[in-house]
Image: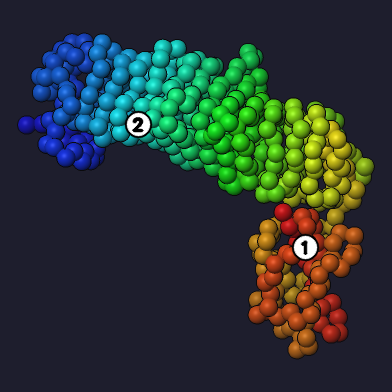
Amino acid sequence: MKPKHYLSILTLFVFQSTLIAQSHIWTGNGGDQDWFNAANWSANTVPDASSDVIIDQNFSVLVNTAPVTVTNIGLFGNATLTLGTDFTAFEQFRIESGATLVWNKGGFIGGAVIQNNGSILMTSTEEKHLTDANLENSGNILLISIGFLRLIDSPKITNTSTGVFEINGGGNLSHQTGNPIFDNEGLVRKIGGSNAGSSYMILEMNNGGVIDIGENQTFLFLSALAELNNLETGSMTGIGTYDIISPFVTPGTISPAGGNIGTLKFINNFSLSPQTKLRFDIFGPTASEHDVIAITGSPDLDGDILVRIVYTPTIGDEFTIITANNINSCDFPSQITNTIGTGPTYLFDVICDNTSVKLRVVEEVLSVDEFASEEYAFFVQPNPVSEMINVVFNPEGSALPSQKLSLSIYNVLGQEVKIIGDFSKENNSFHRGSMGFGVYFLQLSSEEKILATTKLVIN
């Protein structure tokens, strides 16, 4: 009779074999760590293709002398399995929180799903491969100078929102056959250091999380047949280098140093879409006090520029935020404001030339507190906006006049850019239309007087 502890683990594991699988639970009674010692297993036999395998507690198991095939396997507790050969699991390989797979050599073969909620550690330069098997990471994966992880017959790697996939040294993911895909919703990081290091990413990558590259490090996206997609929710950051030969699509965010100060480098492909968001942090007027994107190539620049400013600038302060060999096109807004964080709002001219993009402070913009009406509730929600503008007014305030209301919109130069002559609570949402990125002022008026004013930011 199996102990209740193991029965609960088997229930948690939820094996769904089509055949009645034999349970093999590691006991360690053989006195060593050898997978192939039958005395180490509860069934007194070595697991085979019909086995459901459990390794629990603080046990450490070595499998490195011959290939292994099982139906399912689960690592629980603080268990460690060290892999030095090919491993086939027909259905699942589960690594639960606290457990560790040390992957030294060989690979996973077949249609299994490898579900990692614990840790996977790859440290040696011996051949490793993922062949027609999918890897789902919700825990931690660390590659330390492994050489190449070969991707064969269209495997898929999914890094979930809690997953951390780190490369320290020469860790590379290489397309071998099929169409391998890496979907990232968590964190993919190339760890920085004093020594230069490069990692090849030769596969399709869809980034909805964060890719962070450390100092002196390079990510090389080298497949001309597989895209690098920085999705709308994705962010590419760091103070290293992205070398992109792959087709590059980025409606997402690019942010040097990720909220600190640094220079992020791009080589080759850096053509942006109108949805791209470039974020820059500015801590002071000198070159070392603000973010820079340095491009080796001839980019087409587009999208929006988002700025966080963490000092009190002087009118005329200028910041070079992008450098390039030769800028093919520059379709940024002509003026922007600092829309990230709190504090005073400033208006910047965006200045493009053949080799750089600069921001120049031209005006301080009054904050909403300095001109908002106290008599009427009048504001834009949400604010900033991208497309649709929804104006909320007088939900609980004083009664509005019975006269016809109008809404006028002005830019920061005081020019009227839009008017809605029949404005009401039923007619309070409208599209931005031709209004570009930047700060605007909304003025609510009756036939007799101006009732309220508020601020709108479009980004």
| Residue 423 at x, y percent in the picture | 74, 79
Residue drawn at point x = 68 percent, y = 58 percent: 386
In the image, is 412 to the left or to the right of 179?
right
Confirm or deny contact between disc 1 and disc 2 (CB under 8 A): no
- The residue identified by callout 2 is 133
User: In the picture shown, does residue 434 fall above or below 168?
Assistant: below
Residue drawn at point x = 57 percent, y = 40 percent: 229
In the image, is 308 to the left or to the right of 167?
right
Residue drawn at point x = 43 percent, y = 22 percent: 150
- Count neighbours of disc 1 (C-alpha within 10 A) and say few if under 14, some if 14 to 19, many if 20 or more: few
Whether residue 398 is visible to the viewer of this picture, yes or no, is no
- Count neighbours of disc 2 (C-alpha within 10 A) and say few if under 14, some if 14 to 19, many if 20 or more: many
Where is the N terminus found, in terms of image quarters? top left
- The residue identified by callout 1 is 434
Going by the numbered disc 1, the residue's amino acid type is Ser
| Label 2 residue SS | loop
| Residue 17 at x, y percent in the picture | 18, 38
| Residue 83 at x, y percent in the picture | 32, 17
Using the rendered view, name the quadrant where residue 209 is placed.
Answer: top right
Whether residue 147 is visible to the viewer of this picture, yes or no, is yes
- For the residues marked 1 and 2, what is the alpha-carbon distance in whole angstroms? 49 Å
